[in-house]
Image (cartoon, rainbow, N blue to C red):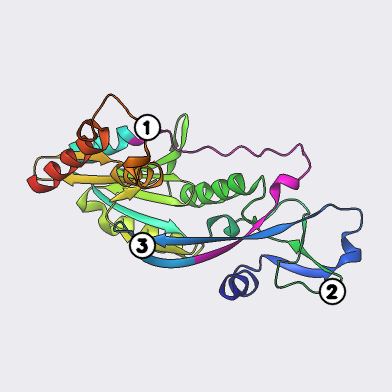
Amino acid sequence: MDDHINEHVNVFKSWTTVDKDEAKGHQILGCQWIFRYKTHKHGRLVKCKSRLVVRGDQQKECDLPTRATTLATTSLRVLLAMVAKFDLETLQVDAVNAFVHADLDEVIYMRMPPCYAQPNKVLKLNKALYGLRRSPLLWQTKFTTALKDLGFTEVPQEPCIVIKGGIICFFFVDDIVFAFRKKDRDEVNHILSSLKKTFTMKDLGELKWFLGTHIIRDRSTRRLWLSQLSYIEKMENEFISDLSRCPETPITEEELPLKRWKRLVESATSER
């Protein structure tokens, strides 16, 4: 929590602390802490995260637009089919605290965070914190504008896909992927260097996971599989970890889709 607050104050300048009287006549939103435990694919703890989230559900309706687009599932499948067919290189990056990179275009006040309150003080927000209704749109606008400044153009009807020559960039909020030919790697590195001057980004290497889906490639045969085994196992552990407590069903455990998925993924992995 201390690290997160320090990042907001010293790096992003996310807010300005003001006297409560200054917010008179304005709505003052609440906030809360969200804690997450990140694990890797084998379930071991990798990182503990805390994030301060604004109570955007308390915001009054306004005339400003709030809708941000996301990458369609069908578009993602088409893109991955192109990656496999043309044996494209992939590079995935993650925008750290993505929304907070965007400036607010309206006046919003927030209560001091729990455990960090000061008497008669509130926060005047400068950045699009998580939880605000307009934050996703403000982030998307800022990120796509930065890409356009670097020479990318949006694909019609699909603003979450942009292209520059033979380089394709697609993203789902803060999960960003570049697909390109080997000869364009220097250009992609230059683009990333330019983006990192504006955004805090973390390189994740070759695309292997996207929105919880495991992407398995066999580049020698130009084949690609999408596996949701981790999600299926999560559901299994949550709902049928103790099969003795489950009601009688007309199918056996071996006939469950989970078992078939496991055999398919194991077969694909062994072929590699």
* Residue type, mark 2 in image: Pro
Q: Quadrant of residue 264?
A: top left
Q: Quadrant of residue 267?
A: top left
Circle 3 is placed at which residue position?
203
Circle 1 is placed at which residue position?
247
Residue that appears at 32% across and 55% down: 188
Q: Is residue 96 visible?
A: no
Residue that appears at 87% across and 60% down: 23
Q: Is residue 114 visible?
A: yes
Q: Which residues are magenta?
A: 49-76
Query: In the rendered structure, which disc, 2 or 3, sits on the residue that comes first in sequence?
Result: 2
Residue that appears at 91% across and 58% down: 24
Circle 2 is placed at which residue position?
119
User: Residue 229: image x %, image y %?
Assistant: 28, 43
Q: Quadrant of the N terminus?
A: bottom right
User: Residue 129: image x %, image y %?
Assistant: 64, 57
Furthest-top residue in view?
250
Dot 2 and dot 3 residues touching (CB under 8 Å)? no
* Residue type, mark 1 in image: Pro
Neighbor class of circle 2 (other Cα within 10 Å; few <14, some 14-19, many 20+) is: few
